[in-house]
Amino acid sequence: MGEDEPRLPLGTDLRRWVRLRRRLNAPPQRVFRAWADPEELARWFPVQIEGGLAVGSRSVLAWPDRRVWWEVTRAEPDSRFAFRRPWLPDDSLVTDVQVSIGPAGYGTHIELEDGPFPLDLPGGIDAWAEAIALWSDTLAMLRAHLDFSVDLRTGRQA
């Protein structure tokens, strides 16, 4: 680093997380099933799922333009679903995703957290930015599916 280049203060944490919250009209049981049941997940997120979504399993989520593996680490019915997934092609950046589900009136409060993303790792900043966009879109697709029976991937009613 040159003398004139900006420096971060000592002790700056170079890890970042994606944290999103939404409220859905669907009950917690239905929200959990939308994440944890391969057939239900394929109705609103990937085009196809190869494998199961049981704890300890690794499955592949497939879209027309990409394939991503998920390794399920936790599944607590109606309250939590967690998995690991890669963000870089060489699998050098794998993050932990946790979806927390809880009742909110007649609906559900959902919180998604993904990370950490080490910003000093080559590709780390781009992966973090990609994750922000992907999970924002994903929660919009989930809400459209559960609350309005609309598949945003196709724009048609489910």
Image (spheres, grey):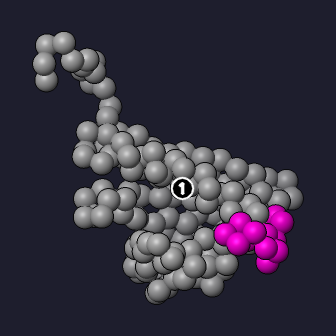
Q: Is residue 22 above or below residue 44?
A: above
Q: Quadrant of residue 12?
A: top left
**Residue displayed at 61% across by 60% down:** 138
Task: Work out whether residue 102 can be spotted.
Answer: no
Q: Please indicate whether residue 88 sits to the left or right of residue 75 in the image.
A: left
**Residue displayed at 61% across by 79% down:** 42
**Residue displayed at 63% across by 63% down:** 79
Q: Nearer the viewer, residue 86 or 101?
A: 86
**Residue displayed at 21% across by 18% down:** 5
**Picture coordinates of residue 124 (x, y %)?**
32, 46
Residue matched to label 1: 134
Q: Which residues are magenta?
A: 147-158
The answer to whether residue 137 is magenta is no
The answer to whether residue 157 is magenta is yes
Q: Nearer the viewer, residue 73 or 2?
A: 2
Q: Is residue 61 above or below residue 89?
A: below
